[in-house]
Image: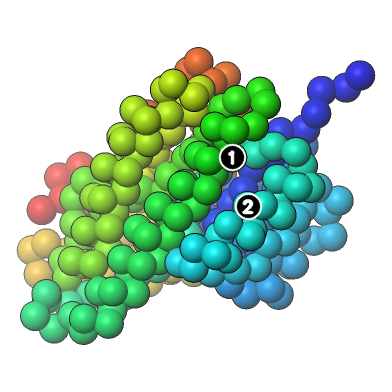
Amino acid sequence: MSEAKKSIIITGAGSGIGRSCAEVFLAHGYRVGLVGRRVAPLKEAADGHADALVLPGDVTDPRQVEDMFQRAFDKWGRIDVLFNNAGISKPGRPIDEIAVEDWLETVNVNLTGAFLCARQAFKIMREQTPQGGRIINNGSISAYVPRPGSVPYTATKHAITGLTRTISLDGRPFNIACGQIDIGNALTEMAAPMTKGVPQADGSVQAEATMDVANVASSVLHMAELPLDANVQFMTVMATAMPYIGRG
């Protein structure tokens, strides 16, 4: 009997990093659940693949999250990996110019969404047989150092680190591993402005080095492929010449 295919749910799978990861995991024989708000981009990313499961929904809605994960579990019989990737950012500005609504939306998507998805994945991984699984959270370079004018985004990404550490601890009795990938300047639609010039800590505006998003997908795959008795706790993958080392 052939070994059952491993399964992964990827949030924010319709574009950017999430889409690249979905394509790579499908190419490596995984069953992939593609989560996102917009159906059309998810279907484009799935590209009719037999192992792709389109799961449209809002990661900030507890009921929708529960339904999405239950659909995947009912179809596959288990969930091996969650890549908590969905996130948004807002235009940079000082804290006193940030609309409260922008703060609340960023926290809701980047942090509460990650919590809700991790919560549901953890529950399934804890109860399934064999017990266990892996949760990979998308942190960011901003989980360590901020960009100017990025209070909502940076605060949520610092919080993701706390989420990762605590899930790692809580998951030990249940064979659930949790790690974090911190990404810098992967060339996606969100990062495209960096090639033209973005504000720096010294007040200047400069273009920044970027890298192919495929480097992120291969890194997430490496983390997911480890046996559950090994874990990449934190990985930073970034454009070599971007201003992270020495930022500020």
The crowding category of the residue bearing disc 1, from other C-alpha atoms within 10 Å (few below 14, some 14 to 19, many at least 20), is many
The residue sitting at 30% across, 35% down in the picture is 165
Q: Nearer the viewer, residue 207 or 215?
A: 215
Residue 77 in the image: state x and y as whole percent. 75, 38
Q: With 202 as the anchor, is 11 left or right in this view?
A: right
Question: Can residue 179 be seen from the camera position used here?
Answer: yes
Classify 69 as above or below 153. above
Task: Tell me, yes or no, whether the two marked residues, 1 and 2, touch with CB atoms within 8 Å.
Answer: yes
Residue 212 in the image: state x and y as whole percent. 51, 51
Q: Nearer the viewer, residue 68 or 213?
A: 68
Question: Does label 1 or label 2 sit earlier along the sequence?
Answer: 2
Residue found farthest to the right? 1
The residue sitting at 71% across, 75% down in the picture is 40
The part of the image, by quadrant, that contains residue 92 is: bottom left
Numbered tag placed on residue 98 in the rendering: none
Q: Secondary structure at mark 2?
A: helix
Residue found farthest to the top? 229
The residue sitting at 56% across, 27% down in the picture is 132
Residue 189 in the image: state x and y as whole percent. 49, 69
Q: With 115 as the anchor, is 5 left or right in this view?
A: right
Say what amino acid the circle numbered 2 marks: Phe
Q: Which residue is mark 2?
A: 69
Residue 235 in the image: state x and y as whole percent. 38, 34
Q: Which residue is mark 1?
A: 124
The crowding category of the residue bearing disc 2, from other C-alpha atoms within 10 Å (few below 14, some 14 to 19, many at least 20), is many
**How many numbered discs, if any?**
2
Q: Secondary structure at mark 1?
A: helix
Report, in whole angstroms, how far the alpha carbon at label 1 lies from the one at label 2.
Answer: 8 Å
Q: With 33 as the anchor, is 115 left or right in this view?
A: left
Say what amino acid the circle numbered 1 marks: Ile
Question: Can residue 195 be seen from the camera position used here?
Answer: no
